[in-house]
Image: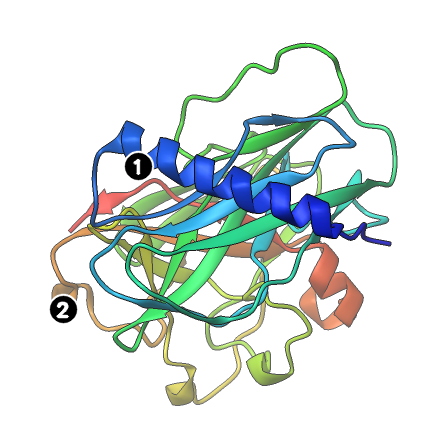
């Protein structure tokens, strides 16, 4: 079970967050951004992970979820680290959803329970928020839970833009992706017009590819497809071991000529089994997530 923070721990945590904010603002000397940061880059198995969402923008934002989405970096992509499948289960401390005013801070803190031995596990957090009727996401710094006792070699690419060894995605055109499967097993990609009922979806990890547009606040606007116009269901697309396929992600998106000028990327989702054979538990545990490189339009 997830460990609970004591009253004294919460007090110390509040002090830690205030110090964290003060240091960040002093270092960055900037405003107009929304940041998601943890207090360290390396954690031991017994450590609490203390983080903060900082609204340094000039407007309020609405946080509707009570905890962030959590991804672990593996050879299969970014996956949800669930107990029994991964090396540990991350236990976020739930927070109260609501509005964050300009200049405010939200504590985002976690512990974790180890399920099996591992040396290093790389983690990325995703926090959803809303502003002016639009959906956005902000990503944390990447951090590592380390048992090796050796200093980890940090990757230099920005969080979310890491090339996964086995599975690679390249943008050919704004709505055309080349997806290469270097794994030893097949993967399945869900078209936007597949027969998945999002309302009954058992997890907060969205099952379809979504387009993201970079904002001037250091975050990404989420541009979800309009599936209401899908007339027929599309079959999942199989990509065998060693295969590379070009996938059209146009679906119900606006034509690329209607895209606002800016910097974009795709958040792709795929599965290691045919979706028709995937139970609710399977859908939660075995989704792979990959971000393409950013492209300008």
Task: Give the residue displayed 29% in from the left and 78% down from the top.
Answer: 133
Under circle 2, the secondary element is helix
Which is nearer the N-term, disc 1 or disc 2?
Answer: 1
**Visible residue check, residue 78:** no
Q: In the rendered image, which quarter is residue 284 located in?
A: bottom right
- Front residue (pair 187, 56): 56
Q: Which residue is mark 1?
A: 25
Q: What is the crowding at mark 2: few (fewer than 14 residues within 10 Å), some, or many (at least 20)?
A: few
Question: Relative to residue 107, is residue 6 drawn left or right?
Answer: right
Q: CA distance from mark 1 to mark 2?
A: 37 Å
Residue 254 appears in which quarter of the rendering?
Answer: bottom left
* Whether residue 88 can be seen here: yes
Whole-percent x, y for residue 222 in the image: 35, 63
Disc 1 versus disc 2: nearer the observer: 1
Q: Residues within 10 Å of mark 1 (few under 14, many from 20)?
A: some
The quadrant of the image that shows the N terminus is bottom right
The image position of residue 290, as x and y in percent, is: 50, 46
Q: Which labelled disc corresponds to residue 179?
A: none
Which residue was labeled with disc 2? 258
Q: Is residue 223 above or below residue 79?
A: below
Is residue 229 found left or right of 191 in the rendered image? left
Vertical arrangement, residue 192 with respect to residue 73, above or below: below
Residue drawn at x 60%, y 38% is 123
Count of numbered tags: 2
Displayed quadrant of residue 116: top right
Q: Position of residue 193 (x, y in %)?
A: 47, 77
- Classify mark 1: helix, strand or loop: helix
**In percent of the image, x 64 and y 34: which residue is there?**
75
Q: Position of residue 278 (x, y in %)?
A: 75, 67
88 above or below 236?
above
Q: Nearer the viewer, residue 119 or 259?
A: 119
């Amino acid at each position: 079970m997830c460990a609970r923070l004591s009253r004294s721990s919460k007090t110390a945590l509040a002090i830690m967050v205030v110090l964290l904010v003060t240091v960040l603002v002093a270092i960055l000397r900037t405003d107009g951004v929304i940041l998601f940061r943890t207090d360290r880059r390396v954690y031991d198995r017994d450590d609490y992970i203390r983080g903060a969402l900082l609204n340094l923008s000039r407007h309020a934002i609405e946080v509707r979820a009570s905890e962030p989405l959590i991804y672990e970096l593996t050879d299969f992509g970014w996956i949800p680290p669930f107990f029994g499948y991964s090396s540990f289960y991350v236990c976020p401390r739930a927070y109260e959803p609501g509005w964050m005013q300009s200049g405010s801070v939200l504590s985002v803190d976690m512990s974790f329970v180890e399920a099996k031995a591992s040396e290093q596990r790389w983690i990325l957090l995703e926090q959803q928020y809303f502003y002016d009727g639009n959906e956005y996401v902000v990503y944390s710094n990447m951090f590592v839970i380390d048992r090796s006792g050796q200093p980890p070699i940090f990757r230099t690419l920005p969080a979310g833009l890491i090339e996964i060894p086995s599975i690679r995605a390249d943008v050919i055109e704004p709505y055309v992706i080349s997806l290469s499967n270097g794994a030893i097993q097949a993967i399945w990609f869900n078209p936007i017009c597949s027969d998945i009922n999002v309302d009954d979806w058992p997890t907060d990890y969205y099952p379809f590819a979504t387009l993201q547009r970079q904002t001037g606040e250091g975050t990404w606007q989420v541009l979800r497809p309009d599936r209401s116009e899908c007339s027929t269901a599309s079959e999942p697309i199989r990509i065998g071991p060693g295969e590379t396929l070009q996938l059209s992600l146009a679906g119900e998106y606006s034509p690329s000529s209607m895209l606002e000028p800016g910097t974009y990327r795709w958040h792709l989702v795929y599965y290691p089994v045919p979706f028709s054979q995937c139970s609710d538990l399977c859908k939660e545990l075995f989704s792979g997530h990959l971000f393409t490189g950013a492209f300008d339009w």
